Amino acid sequence: MRSTTPPRPLPAERPPCSPGAVPKATHQCPDGGQVSLGSRGGGCREVRSPPGASYLPASHGGAGGGSPEGPRRAVRNEPIERPVPVAPGARRDGPPTTDSSATRGEEISVLSEESFPEPSGPPDPGPGEATARTRAVLAGMGAPESLAAPLVTALGPGAATELSEDPWRILSLRQVTPQQADTCARRALGASSSPEDPRRGRAFISHLLGQAARHGHTALEERHLERAARSLGLPSPSDAVKAALDHGEVTLFESMPEPEEDDPGGAEPAEMPEPTRHYAPARLGLAEQQLGEGITRLSATSEPLMDPVTAAEAVQDVVTRYGIDVDPRTSSALGAVALRGVTVLTHDAGSASAVAHALVGAAAIAAGSDTGIAVTAPTTQAAAVLNAELTGIGDGDDEPAVEVVPLGRLLECELPGSFGRGAARPVEAGLVIVAEAMALDVERAAALVEACADGTHLVFVADPSQAPSAGPGAVVSNTIGSGTVAVAELGSATEPDPLARLATMTAQGELDRVEAPGREVVVVPASSGTEAARRVVQLLTDSIPRVLRIPTEHVQVVAATAGGDSGTEALNTLCKNQLNPGPGAHHGFDPGDRVRLGADGPGYSAGDTGYVRQGGDAGVRVELADTRVVTVADPAHLSPGWAVSVADAHGGLWPAVVAVFPPETKGSRPQVYTAMTRARRHLSIVHAAGPDLARAVRQQATIDRHTRLADILREG
């Protein structure tokens, strides 16, 4: 039976901080103001912020709930060894140059529809007033008018005015390069165009930090940012950074090294060292700050749900009731959940049953301590698979002890980044568990932690061998690496199935065949991208449904690349033509099309996949993996979902997966492992990457990201 124990009362508000903390460092706010950062020792800090400032990221809604304190020691993440990737043709090293395309006489490129990649998302919605005005401004800049609608989406209805006042705002679109922006600016400004223009500097800095965020980094150290800025031809990177700070698009975080112990010989104290400076996109940097402070808050305010002996008894009751064999490691890990405010439960590819047992055991602990429990997963399809596994525990006659809900539903998403649950209206549970937690990026994790009231026990259930999230950050890895939370390991299967054996070998750096008498794993070699694509369609439409009796709608294609003959773009076109040909009557989609949702919305989560059922004035109706039908009002949230990238598949689970490694694959061990572990019953590997894939698994053991979260937690 599902626990109906009412949640224990939640505090109406968080305890006020005591005054008088000694500030040790500063954090630069987007509007140029500063706040004082308290000293180490206790969670209370005196905070001074500019009027109206909130440290909850704008994309998350809700009220701020903590000071934007930065770390006070040198950041310990390994520095990036190369500049942020820059546009083709840009200088990558050397001294600052004034030979900028903003002042050169020749064109660096012909500005035409062909010189700009096609904007992603749905077709231009038509000649709305804002779009029409933006088209006119773009025409005067010599830029394609097809960029008007994406610019209105990015900048809002005032896009035309912003673009007229600052032509470099065109860099708000990721498909536009700095060189193209310079050419547009020169055409718009004429002789007044200058490489020293502060508008150019701040746009280029924001562009570089945006590029870094798309590669998963949450912040860049000053020296790396300035080196990348010089490679783009900015004469004075420091002035450009200042312009970006003044404009509010970038946030500065300063960290001071720990003071050395006094010299016993009575020598003069050393001079104050220079702080280490990190820069981040304003919303992203504040989200990471809030996340770290939120985890620290939960650790500091929680009390044990029950003692270890009582927790063990609750788990034993589960064993007796359901007739299951709970691994001793899982039972011990649940003891940590009962005791500690924040816990990471790690597992491997062979731990599906251990995860289900841990969720049932946690529900028993919550019921025994008179507190509510909420279990969530990043996507609807992951929640559906986990719920099916929970239903299978015991003889199947009892209602599952707990239900897994998608994160967007738990937080009651209203609009992308806006949630009904937050500090003012927290989740009504004293124990909150996140499964598939490696898929959590910084902003979604910050929204979740903000929605946890003081005293809540938060648990991340994660497989550390997986790749980091599709969005910026490395939430679970940083949390573990900080050494500030409890970390416990769940049990693993004593006799792992072929899927688990293959994934385990991959996690250890080996890519080899496994015996799979039940066809749990099938490797399909391909000599080219074209042959790989043909094999994918054959598997999807015939082999897997016919031989394994797994319907096509329960099979997800996951490709390692976007481009090429067997990347996601080509595969989506091919699958659409083969499985559901049509004119794209509803914003490019037809009923029966498989789609992926790229943002949170009412009833759905970013990363969900489903099928279009109908279109209408209110939006596109999409059926999700749990059979719910949601209305997607914004067509920009939809993209073809027959084939998705490994990053987009992260956080999702399916009965069967076709993992495609085209000839162009530049993979890594975490990427390959993540693709493999999306499947629960069957995995087909279409392999056209040759020996390079095994080499990548052997040599590219990690995906490094530059983040601040571990240091924020250490300094909590």
Image: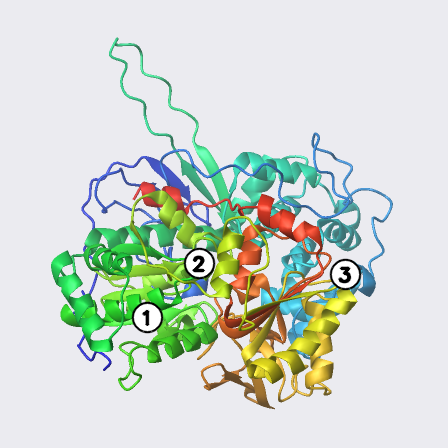
**Camera-side mark, 3 or 1:** 1
Q: Is residue 511 above or below residue 500?
A: above
Q: Is residue 203 visible?
A: no
Identify residue type, mark 2: Met
* First in sequence: mark 3 vs mark 1: 3
Residue 169: horizontal and vertical position, in percent?
Answer: 65, 56
Identify residue type, mark 3: Phe
Q: Quadrant of the C terminus?
A: top left
Residue 238: horizontal and vertical position, in percent?
Answer: 58, 35
Judge the density around disc 3: few (<14), some (14-19), many (≥20) Cα neighbours within 10 Å: some
Image position of 555 (left or right of 411): right
Which structural element holds mark 1? strand
What residue does disc 3 label?
116
Q: Residue at x 65, y 58 (%)?
A: 174
Q: Which of the 4 quarters of the picture holds residue 432? A: bottom left
Q: Quadrant of the N terminus?
A: bottom left
Image position of 62 (left or right of 349): left
Number of on-image labels: 3
Q: Nearer the viewer, residue 385 or 129?
A: 385
Q: CA distance from mark 2 to mark 3?
A: 34 Å
Q: Is residue 146 above or below residue 273?
A: below
Q: CA distance from mark 1 to mark 2?
A: 15 Å
What residue does disc 1 label?
375
What residue does disc 2 label?
438
